[in-house]
Image (tube, rainbow, N blue to C red):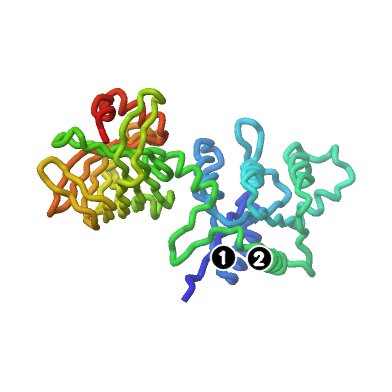
Amino acid sequence: MAKRKIYSAFISSVYESLRDERSEVIDCLLDHSVFPVCMEHFTSAASQKFNDIEKRIDESDFLILILGRKYGSTDENGVSWTEREYEYARQQQKPMVALFCDELIALRRCENIENLTADEKKQINFSNRIGFGREITGEMTIHKIITQFISDCDFSQCSGWVRGERILSDVSLSKWRDAHKAWNVEGKWYHVHVSPDDMSYIRTGTIFIRQNFDPENYKKIEFDGLNYNARYDPSDNELVENKLKRTHWTGTYHIDDNGNMFGIFMAKREFSGSFGEYKVDRGTRRGIHDFMLDISKNAEPDMLQGEFHDEAPSPKFGLIYAFRSREKLLDYLIKNFKEVLENSQ
């Protein structure tokens, strides 16, 4: 059975003078199984808290604006908190509905603007910016306006909640990714396998890493790798990989909070050969990979370093280095293994 989504609406308005309207909006939202998000517990003077308000708007599916006669408390720049919430939601392209209450309707129809207070003039200017405002009348009640808005809303563009767990909005996901760059290993890598037990053992190739880079899934990743016997051609300053001597391997891995990445791989070797004193036949075998990510700084990794352990009957142990570009891989190999590569077959 498909999981049922629950959507949420951020309610923006001054509080004291619009309590009844806010209560009616909340009741209507709950009737439609929409969760109301309110910020009464934040004081208007706490300007440092607006980033918390932004977070709540990011996580909400749409915004409901309730406007009365009062412009409301303002920040140090003279902008009301309601207008800031509206402007931020507009920038994030949140679906919105704006309710114009009786007192605002009367204020907007006032003919003698000069007699109004500065606060009232600001409220008129603010409401004039909102071309989609809906006037509350005896015929068009709050319940009807909200019901119509929800009926017309394109929920395919909304994240919603699934079984009590929030699916992040694009904005929230982008912020999360910016804060977790060190764990982002998705993409194509160029690797080398080397062994301190057999310096002639050098394999290069590619790794395709698949990773759902979101808070719920990023720690589980999948590897799809190819290894080739390789040699270095100094005339062209290039790696020459023997495509006939290939090993294809895949594996599922897990990253922990400290950057340790561990998994079991299944490899299909397509040729026979030797590794030190061991004869290595073609065929399928398993092994273990153990990597370490540098999470000491919030930067996307451009190098992976780890170990491999092949299982018996032809056990092998060695080191793996993987790079985002083939050029960096080549630089590393020339610096550390040039002579061995030149003598490899």
State the separation of the CA atoms marked 1 and 2: 9 Å
Question: Residue 255: x percent and y percent?
Answer: 30, 47
* Secondary structure at numbered mark 1: strand
Q: Residue furthest left?
A: 277
Q: Residue 321's spot in the image, x, y percent?
A: 29, 36
For badge 1, the amino acid type reads Val
Q: Looking at the image, which residue is at 58% across and 54% down?
A: 10
For the point 56% across and 49% down, which residue is it?
A: 57
- At mark 2, the secondary structure is helix
Q: Is residue 214 left or right of residue 81?
A: left
Quarter holding the C terminus is top left
What amino acid is at disc 2?
Answer: Ile
Quick one: 320 or 174, which is closer to the camera?
320
Snapshot quadrant of residue 114: top right
Which residue is labeled 1 in the image?
A: 34
Which residue does the image show at 78% across and 40% down from the upper left? 121
In the image: residue 274, left or right of residue 217:
left
Q: Give 189 or 102, whichever is nearer the viewer.
A: 189
Snapshot quadrant of residue 252: bottom left
From the viewer's perspective, is residue 340 above or below residue 6? above
What x and y, as percent, mark residue 174? 50, 44
Nearest to the observer: residue 124 or residue 259:
259
For label 2, the residue is 150
Point out which mark residue 117 bears: none
- For the question of whether residue 128 can be seen, the reply is yes
